[in-house]
Image (cartoon, rainbow, N blue to C red):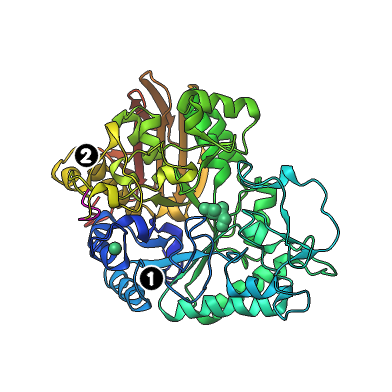
Amino acid sequence: MRITDTSDLWWKNAVIYCLDIETFCDSNGDGIGDFAGAAQRLDYLAELGVTCVWLMPFYPSPQRDDGYDVVDFYGVDERLGTLGDVVEFIRTAKDRGMRVIADLVVNHTSDEHPWFKQARSSKDNPYRDFYVWRSDPPPDTSSEVVFPDQENSIWTKDRKTGEWYLHRFYSHQPDLNVANPAVRDEIAKAMGFWMELGLSGFRVDAVPFFLETEGIDGHTGDPHDYLRDLRRFLLRRSGDAVLLGEVNLPFEQQIEFFGDAADELTMQFDFVTMQQMYLSLARGDARPLAHTLTDRPGIDPDSQWATFVRNHDELTLDKLLDSERQEVFEAFGPEKNMQVYDRGLKRRLPPMLDGDPQRIRMVYSLLFSLPGTPVLFYGEEIGMGENLAAEGRLAVRTPMQWTHEESAGFSSAPPGKLVRPLVEGKFAQDSVNVVDARRDPTSLLGFMGSLIRRYRECPELGWGSFSLIDTPNPAVLAHRCDWEENSLFLFHNFGAEPTEVSVKLKDGDVPDGGGILTDLLQDTMADIQAGDEMQVELPAYGYRWLRVQVPEVGRLW
Ligand code: GLC
Ligand code: CA
């Protein structure tokens, strides 16, 4: 292990935790989460093993898209705190060994942003070109809209000037014109501002749309040049900052956003693998996931995939075939109110799996052992559910459940005054909350903590090379990650039947002179030689992490 690599490329084996300040912890009893409240919970996150907090948008916003509609790139929504509170939060996180990144939402602004108010006021306003306009009627773009329940075109006619403006998302989110150098300067300036305040980078919203310059008259530049410029700017300002990009495209197109010289996005969410994982879960068959992992293109050692089970949006299944999507819907979200936009689910994992603790743990064991850097969405660590009565994606953005009290310890305000309704029923705070989970050594929270520790102790996972191991049983995903002289063998049973897998260790699999085989989740150890066969028993939905390593004096695990 070269010290320069492991300390500089911190994102290669980070544990990223996404939270929304609004729904995490309320310090002043107004029913709305705030920075001061979230800062009080940083010790909890540090104890869990989180190394990087990702903050969803906290900027001033009319809140028509939960803060993804920004009116001021330099401010803080006053309900959540002040710039001073942001700095205190970042400083406290750093003190506990955690970095903070935040959403950079620059594909569009809110239509209430002062730039757009200016831009729409007349065709010759200096801000007109901050946005994308067309003068002739647009063609039918109903198949291109992101939110088909609300929009039927990506162009909206603006009354004042009689021209149409581009909006990839809602019509109240006009797209910025990134071909305009003045817009590029503004974006860089906003990034620089937050980095000065201590952010370690950004989760870049909607990257392909943000970079897109189609529809902009006279523009010929390569959007990847612009992404490279942004990365260069970021690194000039802060050498260890990252761009974690949202690029939900097939692998062949997605891979371009890392850049040929690993000089564009540092990390990208792996939407494709996530979707195939759900198909595998629905079928009790590991092959869809296995095939996808084999197809996943190799990346530069400085780049990284970000793996996840759930994010803050709909659980999108848009990359599955229609029939496959139907299978997942039938297995995990058969009712219409569980589905959204005809392509995704409004549910979180535990309710989808009927709360089956073994199956839920298998999924998280998988998350932490897939090659890549895991990203958790707040509440996953305790097994929170969703509130299906909430509109669309808000179903999974309910207040964090800290205690069993009536407002879940999220706020001292009564439940009716909270910014969002709480989860109800089987996954509500009386059965799912942090305080009870901490007292229970068998809780999901305790399990997540130990998984995270193991993951952090195994650089093979974040850094190593990945390969599949052939097994005769299609329900089992068997894979290995190798790095330097150590290897991890990982087994996940997607099936409801117990099974056994045997793996013969070849020369080269075991250090010369023999190694030690450690069962990392069961804490057993044995000597092992090349030629030995590992017999791996897996219960229904079982999982095992076996590590073959060099014997070493003083080894702790
Ligand atoms: C991204 C975000 C989503 C938001 C959209 C528009 O897809 O993940 O929550 O609504 O961009 O900003
Ligand atoms: Ca508050």
Residue 516 lies in the magenta stretch: no
- Residue 411 part of the magenta-drawn span: yes
Q: CA distance from mark 2 to mark 1?
A: 37 Å
Part of the protein shown in magenta: 408-412
| Figure quadrant of residue 58 | bottom left
Q: Residue shown at 36%/47% (left/top)?
A: 398
Left or right of residue 154, residue 84 in this image: left
Q: Earlier in the sequence, mark 2 or mark 1?
A: 1
Q: Position of residue 503 (x, y in %)?
A: 43, 30
In the rendered image, which quarter is residue 491 located in?
Answer: top left
In which quadrant of the rendered image does the N terminus lie?
A: bottom left
Q: Are marks 2 and 1 in contact (CB under 8 Å)?
A: no
Residue drawn 59% across and 63% down?
265
> Is residue 61 depicted above or below 529 in this figure?
below
Q: Nearer the viewer, residue 472 or 383?
A: 383
Q: Is residue 384 above or below residue 216?
A: above
Question: Toward which corner of the image does residue 75 lie, by quadrant?
Answer: bottom left
Residue pointed to by mark 1: 78
The answer to whether residue 97 shows anywhere in this view is no
Q: Which residue is mark 2?
A: 443
Q: Secondary structure at mark 1?
A: loop
Which residue is more in the foreground, 430 or 136? 136
